[in-house]
Structures are given as structure tokens and as C-alpha cells.
Amino acid sequence: MKIIKNNANLQDMIEKEKEKSKFPMKLTCSECGSEFEVEESDLEVGELGLYQLPNGCPCCGSEIEIDDGIDLTVDNVNFPQHYYRFNGRQLDDDEINKYVKECIETLRNTDDKNFYHTFTGSGSTVVHVMRYEGDKDFVVDVCNEYYETNIPFTKEDEEKWCE
């Protein structure tokens, strides 16, 4: 006997696919308590690859946090769409100068010749100081209102760096 098309298994596969689907997704507004369902077409992918409602809650307009989205990879990450923008308190020049000095002192005080960079910061400012082998200076980057995202390790990355 030869089965040409197995409709029984096909129906099971369709049901399993429906179960896997995230949509429609039920959401509750943390501000007004309204409950509603959204389809994937109602959402945008934003910072860190998380879904977001472009106009917030359809009842009160408040921003809705959705702890679901897409898995970011080196091939699909898109700036600035998938990045979180730090736009907190601006540091004054004295604070930035203090951070630069701290970073340079950290590099100067290490006995590890393979220690090439360090960074620190607060609010929306990051100070990054590097030294390059063979050069005779420190490279200082001060980044205000910077962006950041996370791209998970691939299996190969985990094998290389996670023991």
C-alpha cells in the first residue's frame, strides 16, 4: 500500500502550527487595565528586537511593554530600530574628565599586557579608553546619548567562549 496524501497527519500539523503561533496576542495595559488582542501586523519590532505598539494602548495611548519579539542576529540587526537609546541625565564636563582619568589609571595600573580597553559612565554618557599595541597614546571616546542592543551568541560563539 502506498499513501499518496495523509490528511489525518496534515490536520494534526495544522493544529500544532496554530498552537505555536504567538498571534493573536492578548495584551493588558498596565495604566488603564484595558485588555485587547493584537495581530502581528498591529506591531512593530523595536529596541532589543521586542514587539511594540506604534501608538501605544488603543484605549489610553500609554506605552505598552511586550516581552516578546524576534531573535536578533548579526544578519537581521538594524540600527537604530533594534537599539535602546540611552538619553538620561547628561554629565557635566568635570564628571566626564573624572571618568577619563579613572579609565586611564585603570589601564596604567594593570599588570596584564593583554588588557587594552576599559570603560565607565553614567546616565546617557559612556567613556571608553583604549590603548593599541605599538602606539604611544590612549584613545578616548566620550559617547553621549549612545545606543545599545544585544545579539545572542550563536552555537559556535558559545562553544568558543562559554566553557
Image: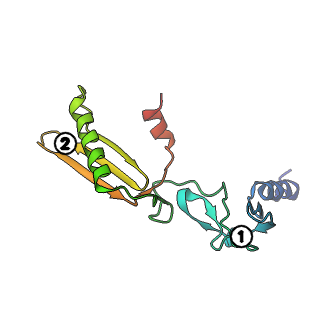
Q: Which amino acid type corresponds to the residue marked 2 in the rendered image?
A: Tyr
Residue 148 rendering spot, x and y as whole percentages? 45, 55
Q: Which mark is residue 136?
A: none
Q: Nearer the viewer, residue 23 or 65?
A: 65
Would you call the spot at circle 1 few (<14 residues within 10 Å), some (14-19), or many (20 or more)? many
Q: Secondary structure at mark 1?
A: loop
- Left or right: 55 as drawn, with respect to 34: left
Q: Which amino acid type corresponds to the residue marked 1 in the rendered image?
A: Cys
Residue 78 rendering spot, x and y as whole percentages? 47, 63
Q: Secondary structure at mark 2?
A: loop
Residue 45 rendering spot, x and y as whole percentages? 59, 64
Residue at image point 77% right, 57% down: 17
- Say which residue label 2 marks: 132
- Left or right: 63 as drawn, with respect to 3: left
Front of the two marks 2 and 1: 1
Residue 138 rendering spot, x and y as whole percentages? 18, 45
Q: Which mark is residue 57?
A: 1
Q: Nearer the viewer, residue 30 or 136?
A: 30
- Left or right: 155 as drawn, with respect to 9: left
**CB atoms of marks 2 and 1 within 8 Å:** no
Kindly indicate the quadrant of the structure image that contains residue 145: bottom left
- CA gap between label 2 and label 1 equals 49 Å
- Asked if 6 appears above or below 131 in the picture, the reply is below
Mark earlier in primary sequence (2, 1): 1
Q: Nearer the viewer, residue 100 or 110?
A: 100
- Asked if 56 appears above or below 94 in the picture, the reply is below
Q: Nearer the viewer, residue 74 or 45?
A: 45
Would you call the spot at circle 2 few (<14 residues within 10 Å), some (14-19), or many (20 or more)? few
Residue at image point 28% right, 45% down: 98
Snapshot colouring: rainbow
